[in-house]
Image: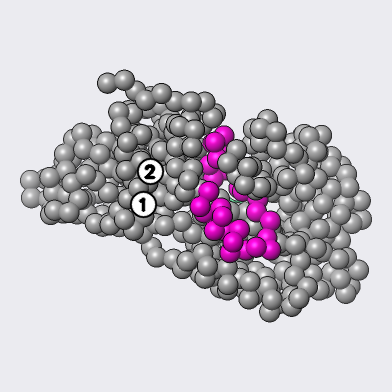
Amino acid sequence: MFVRDDYVSESDWNRFREVSEGFPTPNIFVNLRSIKKHFLQLKDSFPYANIYYAVKANPGVPIIKLLDSLGSNFDIASRYELDEVLGLGISADRLSYGNTIKKASDVAYFYEKGVRLFATDSKEDLKNIAKNAPGSKIFVRILLENSSSADWPLSRKFGCHPDMAYDLLVMAREAGLMPYGISFHPGSQQRDIGTWNDAIAKTKYLFESLEDEENIHLSMINMGGGFPASYIQPTNDLKVYASEITRYLQDDFGDDIPRIILEPGRSLVGNSGILTSEVVLVSRKNNTALQRWVYLDAGKFNGLIETLDESIKYPVVTDKDGGREGEVIIAGPTCDSADIMYENEKYKLPVDLKSGDKLYWLTTGAYTATYASVEFNGFPPIQTYYITEDGLQDKFGNPVEKPVK
Ligand SMILES: *Cc1c(COP(=O)(O)O)cnc(C)c1O
C-alpha cells in the first residue's frame, strides 16, 4: 500500500533492520542521523531564527544531547523535563518555559534554576509569574481558530484572544515583568501554510498597537511548531513553508523583523522513528466478511495514541509487500474497544499476512513512546532504542546490547 522508499532511504532501512534484529516487539528505533539532517535543514531554511526543540515530542537523552551539540535551545513544559535538560549540562538561558498551564511552585522552581523566559495566556498565570519569577521576560500566546487543516490541532485549550494578550502585556509591565513578545502555535502537522500568515498579521497588530498606545516595545515572535513530518497526507516541503513564512514576516514587518523563535517537535524527530509491531491475530467477524481484522502487539495505549480519531495516519509496511492486498481494520492488543487504530481509513495489507509477521510503522519518532500507558492490561510501556554514532542507546543514553539468540 505504501512505498517504503518514499519515507525511509534504503541505507537507513538496512541499518534499522540490522540493529533491530532480535529485539522483542513492540519497540521503536529512532535514527539520530535523520534528526540531525532535519535540524540542519530547518536551520538552513530559517537562518534568522532561534530553534527551541519542543522536548515533549521525544525527550530521549540521546536526542537532547545531539541537539545540544548542534546548538539548539529547548522548550520545556514541566519541571521533569527541566531537570533532565539541566542534568545534561545545558544552561538555563537556553530554555523557555512554554507551558501556559503551571503551578506557582513550578514557576518558582524554574526561576530558582535560572529560567527567565515564560509563556502565559491568562491573568492568574501572569500573577503567579510576577510573584515567583520577578523581572522575567514574558511572551503571550494568542489563540488561533483555524486549525481544521492541522492533523493534531493545539487550539482552544491554549492561547487567548489578541485583546486579552494586549491587556496581559500591559499588566506584565505594571507587575515588574518584561513584556517581550507574542507566541502562537499554528497546530501540529499544519498542512495549510496560510495559517502562519493570519497569525503573523495578528502579531503585527499587537506589536504596533502596544508600541503606539502603551509605549511597550516587543522584540520577539515565537512561531511555535507545526512543521510537517511525512505521514500519508501530502504536505509541502519545508523549503516552501520557509519561503512563504519569511515572505509573510517581510510583508508585515519589512526590514524590522523581530527576534524569531521556532519550537519544532514533530518535524525534527517524527521521521526518525520506526515502530515495529507483531501480528497477534488475523480474523474475520463472519464467514463471508470481506474485511480482515488485524490485531497487533502495539496499539493506542502503547505508542500509537495519535491514531485517536484516526488523526495521524502513519505509513505502514510489511515484509510481504508487493503482492495481493486486501482491506483491513487495524487494532491493538488490549481489552478496550477504543484500541482500534484504523477503521474508517481503508488500510490495505497483504492477503497472506499472518500471526508472527511484522508490521513496521514509519514516521513514529514523535509523540509515540512517551504517550504509552504504564501497564494497561499488564503490558509494559513500549521501549525506544536510539541509533547513534556510538551504537545503540536507551532513553537515558545508556548503551544497549543486542539480544543474544
Ligand atoms: C507541542 C508544542 C510544540 C511542538 O509542536 P510540533 O507541531 O510538534 O512541532 C511547540 N510549542 C509548544 C508550545 C508546544 O506545546
Q: Where residue 310 sits: x, y (%)?
A: 38, 53
- Residue 338 versus residue 168 in the image, above or below: above
Single out the mark in the foreground, 2 or 1.
1
At label 1, counting other C-alpha atoms closer than 10 Å, the crowd grade (few under 14, some 14-19, many 20 or more) is some
Q: Where residue 147 sits: x, y (%)?
A: 53, 64
Q: Amino acid at mark 2?
A: Ile
Position of the N terminus by quadrant? bottom left
- Asked whether residue 47 is drawn in magenta, I would say yes
Bounds of the magenta span?
36-63
How far apart are the alpha carbons under marks 2 and 1?
9 Å
Disc number for residue 326: none
Q: Which residue is painted at 73% across and 55% down in the image? A: 121
- To which residue does mark 2 refer? 274
- The reply to whether dot 2 and dot 1 touch (C-beta < 8 Å) is yes
Q: Secondary structure at mark 1?
A: loop
- Can residue 156 be seen in the rendering of this structure? no
Q: Where residue 31 sits: x, y (%)?
A: 44, 42
Disc number for residue 8: 1
- Asked whether residue 104 is drawn in magenta, I would say no
Q: Amino acid at mark 1?
A: Val
Number of marks in picture: 2
In the picture, measured across the screen, residue 360 lies left or right of residue 149, that is left
Q: Where residue 19 sits: x, y (%)?
A: 36, 34
**Ligand 1 contact, mark 1 (Cβ < 8 Å):** no
Q: Earlier in the sequence, mark 2 or mark 1?
A: 1
Q: Secondary structure at mark 2?
A: strand
317, 199: nearer the viewer: 317
